[in-house]
Amino acid sequence: MNAIQDGQPLELMLAGYAAGTLPRALHALVGAHLELSPVNRGFVARLEEGLSRNVAAQKPVAIRGRDARLDAIFSAGPVEAAIAERKALEPRALRHFFGKSIDDLTFRTVLPGVKEFRLETDDDTRAVLYRIRAGRKMPQHSHEGAEVTLVLQGGFTDETGHYRRGDMVIADEHLDHVPVADADEECICFAVMDAPLRLTGTFGRLVNRFVSH
């Protein structure tokens, strides 16, 4: 079973968010999308309302270790509120997931004009934060599984459309594309995937030939 599920429709992913069944990194990504964009808030709110009615109708059961759990919740320090939006690129859901501001993370250069920061996950997903120089064209690639990307700053264009801050993009193994960052601003994206990317096109063939020898 893939953590994101190949070909999973947007509605199923949002339902998983409402039910709390998504992998932790993907849950944070969807929560951040809902903070930044109103597009899917109503749908998720209706799902959560329906789930809450189901829970309320169930017979209460004792919670093991209830007092200890409550003590842990109330003793935890408050999650730092997002500062001015222009300074804090990440919404609260991602700031909580990262444990710090994007500005405090250490990125590594993987290609000219492209930096990344990989986050540890405790499941089968891979979580990566990208900083892409304005106007930079990414290598042509496809996907061995599913990938969900959230735009945090700037934007990019590929064969499927143009995406800006707050947009969430779902790709699968059927998409072969060349994302290009907008020319006016650095593009910062958070991506969660359940399988590696696969380089295609001329650059990909050269890399694959080099690796195979």
Image: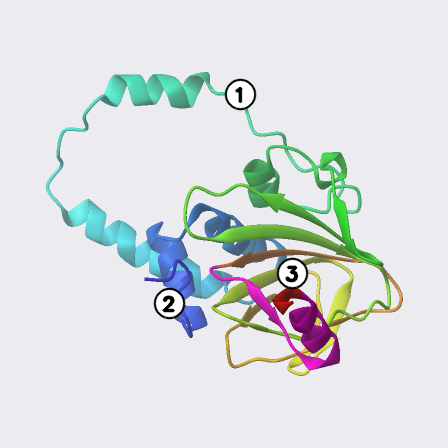
* Amino acid type, residue under disc 3 in the picture: Gly
* Amino acid type, residue under disc 2 in the picture: Leu
**In the picture provided, is 186 more to the left or to the right than 148?**
right
- Dividing the picture into quadrants, the one containing residue 165 is bottom right
Element assignment for label 2: helix
* Label 1: few (<14), some (14–19) or many (≥20) C-alpha neighbours in 10 Å: few
- The residue depicted at 57 percent of the width and 80 percent of the height is 175
- Dividing the picture into quadrants, the one containing residue 95 is top right
x, y percent for residue 154: 78, 61
x, y percent for residue 195: 49, 62
* Amino acid type, residue under disc 1 in the picture: Gly
Residues 155 and 23: in front is: 23
Sequence-earlier tag: 3 or 1: 1
Residue on which disc 2 sits: 12
Q: Judge whether residue 196 is colored magenta.
A: yes
User: Mark number for residue 166?
Assistant: 3
Which quadrant is home to the N terminus? bottom left
Sequence-earlier tag: 3 or 2: 2
What segment carries the magenta color?
A: 194-210
Residue extending farthest left: 59
Residue on which disc 1 sits: 77
**In the picture provided, is 77 more to the left or to the right than 58?**
right
What whole-number distance in Å separates the C-alpha atoms at marks 3 and 2?
19 Å
